[in-house]
Image: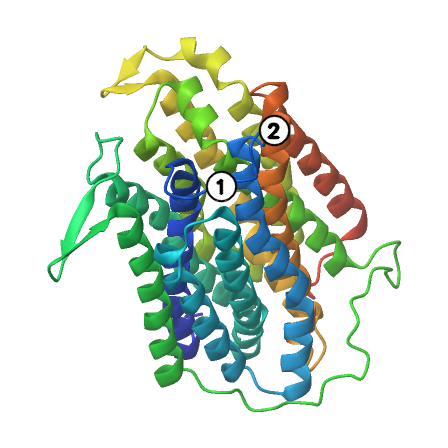
């Protein structure tokens, strides 16, 4: 069988890649921007910089996730998707454009909040379109292709941001650029890229994405189900809980950049490479995993992914204790940095095994006209996890380097137990 991908899915995927590239820049840029002294922290004396950074990074996810059930449901009721996506991209672009002009921490919070609202309008609606475009037996593959492109933007964005801010791999100071005769800092250059990503995405969606043919009106009851029919918990809800824990494990790394760099003796660029490693592994594996789940089933990948996630997370917390396993330096890079990179890649493999199969399982169970509502369970959970991760690490890092990683490893154990006991296979047959 030849596995093809709908051209509209490809258009959405490329648009989401451009948008994610700009958004992921800010994961690296905002912590450095806040700590640089360019942003006034008046009235916040005594509050740790790590916690302030965690609040900024988390606010985006909190607003994004809180609003997604409503935007997903609204698009189901309206029977329209494209207008929601375009409106969200405009709001996100405006939020990105104001950063060079803000001078206080509170205004940074406001700009990040605006971006969260924009993302809430696009994320569940985009995935609903991917689900509705999918032909029978190709849902996992379509989600895999979509996630691959999206994660290219999200994964390579931090590395490009690290280079753009400092102007080179070896540099650790903020550089400046001359654009059209105007000198801008590395920070402002990164914000320009974030706006550009949203603009490119807007153009692609406007020109290449069409509304799918309506199949059936949405149900009157579009509430999220928690209790299951044949088991204690609804399987989509359980996968949503696992997605929340998985995303928390991804995001714990962002807030503790300063602590990680000090512990491993490295600079911002190596940190950005390690941060991106989770996503790079997903770029390589999302499509083959998604297509394999169309043949083998969703459940084996979900169980295997959560099982692998436990050691991948825990090992990151004890990297300094394991550095003797390698030479002190290899190819000019410290052993600690290389070990962290390896464990982050292992985490990426685990995430890839959960991501596309989880979305495909939710799509399998979505009723006619309910894709936005059903898939918003997973997108909301992912966003809340991305919001919770920086807060978890911002608080727990004070008790020791290992604690943020140990906490999310424990959450992965809970996800594994819940998935094993509450989630059944959704494919009618396995091959």
Residue 326, given in percent of the width and then of the height, sits at: 36, 13
Question: How many neighbours does mark 1 have within 10 angstroms: few (below 14), some (14-19), or many (20 or more)?
Answer: many
Horizontal relation, residue 225 to residue 3: left or right: right
Q: Which residue is at the front of the view, 326 or 198? A: 198
Q: State the SS at label 1.
A: helix
Q: Quadrant of the C terminus?
A: bottom right
Up-down: is 56 above or below 101?
above
Q: Which residue is at the front of the view, 234 or 51? A: 51
Answer whether residue 249 is visible to the viewer in this image.
Answer: no
Residue 404 tag number: 2
Q: Which residue is at the front of the view, 55 or 4? A: 55
Question: How many neighbours does mark 2 have within 10 angstroms: few (below 14), some (14-19), or many (20 or more)?
Answer: many
Q: Quadrant of the N terminus?
A: bottom left
Residue 271 position by quadrant: top left
Q: Are marks 2 and 1 in contact (CB under 8 Å)?
A: no
Residue 421 tag number: none
Up-down: is 368 above or below 413?
below
Q: How many labels were placed on the picture?
A: 2
Which color scheme did the rendering employ for the protein?
rainbow
**Residue drawn 47% across and 14% down?**
320
Mark in front: 2 vs 1: 2
Residue 379, given in percent of the width and then of the height, sits at: 61, 60
Residue 331 position by quadrant: top left
Q: State the SS at label 2.
A: helix
Answer whether residue 248 is visible to the viewer in this image.
Answer: yes
| Distance between the alpha carbons at the discs numbered 2 and 1 | 20 Å
**Residue drawn 75% across and 44% down?**
420
Mark 2 and mark 1 lie on one chain; the one further toward the N terminus is: 1
**Residue drawn 88% across and 64% down?**
229
In the picture of the structure, the residue carrying the numbered disc 1 is: 349
Residue 362, given in percent of the width and then of the height, sits at: 67, 64
Looking at this view, name the residue that lies furthest to the front: 43
């Amino acid at each position: 069988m030849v596995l093809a991908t709908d051209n509209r899915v490809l258009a959405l995927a490329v648009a989401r890649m451009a948008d994610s590239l700009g958004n992921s820049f800010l994961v690296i840029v905002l912590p450095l921007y806040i700590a640089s002294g360019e942003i006034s922290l008046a009235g916040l004396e005594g509050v740790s910089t790590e916690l302030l950074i965690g609040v900024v990074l988390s606010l985006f996810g909190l607003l994004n996730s809180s609003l997604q059930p409503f935007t997903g449901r609204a698009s189901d009721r309206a029977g329209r998707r494209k207008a929601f996506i375009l409106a969200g991209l405009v709001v996100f672009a405006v939020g990105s454009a104001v950063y060079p002009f803000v001078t206080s921490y509170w205004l940074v919070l406001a700009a990040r909040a605006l971006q969260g609202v924009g993302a809430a309008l696009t994320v569940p609606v985009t995935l609903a379109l991917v689900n509705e475009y999918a032909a029978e037996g190709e849902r996992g593959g379509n989600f895999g292709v979509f996630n691959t492109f999206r994660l290219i933007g999200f994964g390579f964005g931090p590395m490009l941001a690290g280079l753009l801010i400092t102007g080179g791999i070896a540099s650790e100071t903020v550089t400046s650029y001359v654009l059209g005769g105007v000198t801008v800092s590395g920070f402002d250059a990164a914000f320009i890229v974030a706006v550009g990503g949203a603009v490119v995405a807007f153009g692609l969606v406007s020109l290449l994405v069409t509304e799918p043919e309506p199949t059936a009106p949405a149900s009157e009851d579009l509430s999220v189900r928690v209790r299951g029919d044949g088991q204690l918990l609804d399987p989509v809800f359980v996968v949503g809980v696992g997605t929340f824990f998985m995303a928390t494990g991804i995001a714990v790394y962002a807030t503790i950049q300063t602590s990680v760099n000090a512990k491993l003796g490295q600079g911002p660029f190596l940190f950005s490479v390690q941060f991106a490693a989770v996503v790079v592994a997903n770029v390589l594996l999302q499509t083959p995993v998604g297509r394999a789940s169309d043949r083998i089933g969703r459940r084996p990948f979900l169980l295997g992914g959560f099982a692998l996630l436990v050691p991948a997370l825990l090992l990151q917390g004890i990297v300094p204790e394991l550095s003797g396993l390698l030479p002190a330096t290899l190819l000019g890079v410290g052993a600690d940095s290389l070990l962290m990179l390896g464990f982050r890649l292992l985490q990426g493999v685990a995430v890839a095994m959960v991501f596309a199969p989880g979305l495909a399982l939710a799509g399998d169970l979505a009723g006619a006209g309910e894709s936005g509502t059903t898939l918003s369970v997973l997108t909301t959970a992912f966003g809340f996890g991305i919001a919770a991760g920086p807060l978890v690490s911002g608080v727990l890092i004070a008790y020791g380097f290992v604690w943020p990683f140990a906490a999310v490893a424990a959450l992965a154990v809970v996800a594994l137990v819940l998935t094993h006991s509450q989630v059944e296979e959704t494919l009618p047959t396995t091959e």
